[in-house]
Image (cartoon, rainbow, N blue to C red):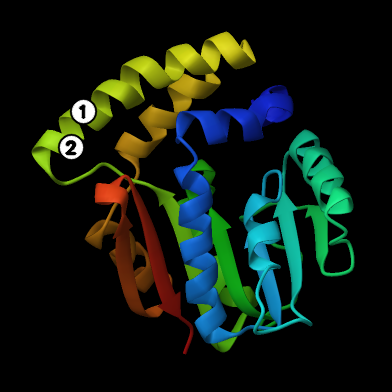
Amino acid sequence: MFDNIASGYDFLNRTLSLGTDRIWRRKLRKMLDVANPALVLDVATGTGDLAIECAKSKRKKTRKITGVDISEKMLEKGREKIEKKHLGDCIDLRYGDSENLEFESNMFDAVVVGFGVRNFENLDKGLREMRRVTKPSGKVFILDFSMPRNSFIRTLYSFYFFRILPLIGKIVSGNNHAYRYLPESVSQFPQYEQMTNRMNKAGFVNTKYKPLTFGIAVIYSGSKN
């Protein structure tokens, strides 16, 4: 599915989120900068937007970011963007299964995910793998969509998310299923305390969540003992 929409993926993200997806990634990167990691793993990197944002840090010029994804078409798009931005010396995108990461344990200072954990076939396994490859005292940051808790905002958002978004996505991408899958996956995904509880179950500590833009998106964070 993601191979099929790779060519128009970035354009649709900007359009359908009215550009706020960039703001959300920037907020995650600023949280990451506080931890100041040298080695970062971007799980389910897609076209590399979060990896590129994480490379903008002024606090760690030697930061190295590895992005993994199972969609080769997405990775191809990401590599083109990285080459144009001359970031090939600090970002490496490679094929990889988020639930079976081919890295040594305790390898990365931080692990990040942007809009990818909803696509894990087994969320708990994916979270355990993320913890395994994180160094002791390392951080994890997960950015994803959520359903707003305010009833009025939730009603407006649901109308856009379930009615308007799939229609625009179908017209632009030609793929009806992909942009119906997005709101369905968000509505079924564990959110807020449910998500931090799953992170706790996977072994993370000091888990927190930070709602963004009225709760349309959330950044979850945690640490490894």
Question: Is disc 1 placed on a helix, strand or loop?
Answer: helix
Q: How many marks?
A: 2
Q: CA distance from mark 1 to mark 2?
A: 5 Å
Q: Is residue 122 left or right of residue 158?
A: right
Q: Is residue 37 above or below residue 140?
A: below
| Residue 203 appears in the picture as rendered | no
Determine the residue positioned at 55% across, 35% down. 14
Up the image or down, 27 lies above or below 32; here it is above
Q: Which residue is mark 1?
A: 156
Q: Which residue is mark 2?
A: 153
Give x and y (percent) for residue 25. Answer: 52, 57
Q: Which sits in the foreground, 70 or 66?
A: 66
Q: Is residue 80 left or right of residue 111?
A: right
Q: Nearer the viewer, residue 189 or 85?
A: 85
Q: Type of residue at label 1? A: Leu
Q: Residue at x 71, y 68 (%)?
A: 55
Query: Residue 20, located in which quarter of the rendered image?
Result: top left
